[in-house]
Amino acid sequence: MKKSIGADTLAYPTPVWCVGSYDAEGRPNVMTIAWGGICCSKPPAVTVSLRKATYTYGCIMACKAYTISVPSTKYIAEADYFGMVSGKTTNKFEDTGLTAVPSDKVDAPYVGEFPLVLECKVIHTHEIGLHTQFVGQIVDIKADEEILNEKGLPVMERGAPFVFAPGIREYRALGEVVGRAFDIGKKFNRPS
Amino acid sequence: MKKSIGADTLAYPTPVWCVGSYDAEGRPNVMTIAWGGICCSKPPAVTVSLRKATYTYGCIMACKAYTISVPSTKYIAEADYFGMVSGKTTNKFEDTGLTAVPSDKVDAPYVGEFPLVLECKVIHTHEIGLHTQFVGQIVDIKADEEILNEKGLPVMERGAPFVFAPGIREYRALGEVVGRAFDIGKKFNRPS
């Protein structure tokens, strides 16, 4: 029996992505978001949504670029911290001891210790409501060699990402492989 | 050492969401997507990105509404199938035996067997490139009572969702709780 629980942002799972940017003075900043996702294959693009009140909002408006550093569970406390305090009042890289690495492709820094990094230039800015959505074209991806397979593709488990559940505010690691995409569903294919 | 792996949609983890819609003749359709996410808190809104070639694209353009049904691992084969074949040529509800339940809030059906459902009306349509992004305002959420906690919030593990890794095309279940959001990062708070 389904119960109506009203209009809210209770979808799951959502990603935990750390958005790197420079402010107008070139100081590196990083902020954790869960309101985002891939939005296009050609050009490859992602979205991140931010409130205007955030420091990162002004940074991205100034530089028209950002990075997404995907944290591993090893750095879960750092990633959580990046979403708790504002770059207006503190330098979150200094606070945590993590490294702001300048992207060689876009005008934004990334978190050197995180295994997967997307470097993005802003191609669209959409006003949705409380949040502004920044569509970023993925210009390059940088990955720790240890997480790549023999084909050069990132292996998700090696990057040890985690997800966020809105509402209950819980982070969960990933578990076992439950299927191959575009494969496990073949059993429903009817003979033609 | 980080390696450049080029511009591609290799971010992870991405959600596995089944988008329900009606075609112009009122036939129910459902399609699995991973290019999406929450995009705004007020109004609560999500995005799903679709290629114009998909049957669901025409359905959403016709009805200006869709649902997102979040599958549990029990239905992983069905969810995978929903992303493998087109509603142009087959009725995916009939093929899998799952139930198209008419939303009482928007002009779209949802998957009755899946534990969490978002009912959305389209408030923006953004052309990004190969994919069109449909921003849907969440009008209501329906959840199986079994996945709700005492506060009426969905407990992610009870819904048993899974995530998709682009590139390696792998589905993974969720694992253990690794932290409380807005809490585990407090250790970096400096005394003020």
Image (cartoon, coloured by chain):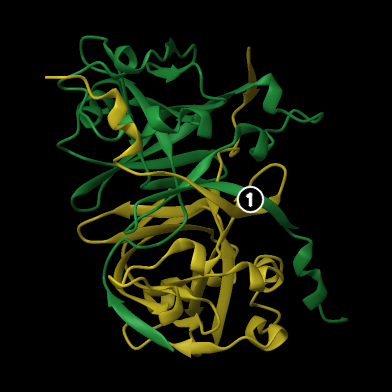
Chain colours: A green, B yellow
Residue type at tag 1: Gly
Rendering quarter of residue A9: bottom left
Which of the image's four quarters has the C terminus of chain A?
Answer: bottom right
Q: Which residue is mark 1?
A: A175
In the drawing, does residue B137 fall left or right of residue B157? left
For the point 51% across and 68% down, which residue is it?
B159
Can residue B129 be seen at all in this image of the molecule? no
Residue B158 percent across, percent down from the top left: 50, 68
Query: Circle 1 — which element?
Result: strand
In this rendering, the answer to whether A18 lies above or below B111 is above
Q: Looking at the image, is A55 positioned above or below residue A126? A: above
In the image: residue B134, left or right of residue A151: left
* Residue B106 image-quadrant placement: bottom left
- Residues A47 and B143: in front is B143
Kindly indicate the quadrant of the structure image that contains residue A49. top left
Q: Residue at 64% x, 46% y: name it.
A: B165
- Whole-percent x, y for residue B33 in the image: 56, 60
Number of on-image labels? 1
Outermost residue, left side:
B192
Specify few, some or many for label 1: CA neighbours under 10 Å numbering under 14, 14-19, or 20 or more.
some
Q: Is residue B187 above or below residue A135?
A: above
Chain for numbered disc 1: A
Name, please, the residue furthest toward the right.
A191
Picture quarter with the N terminus of chain A: bottom left
With B60 as the anchor, is A80 left or right in this view? left
How far across and how far down the image is residue A129, in percent?
19, 53
**A18 or A74: nearer the eye?**
A74
- Residue A18 in the image, given as x and y percentages of width and height: 40, 31
Task: Pick whichever, B86 or B98, lies toward us.
Answer: B98
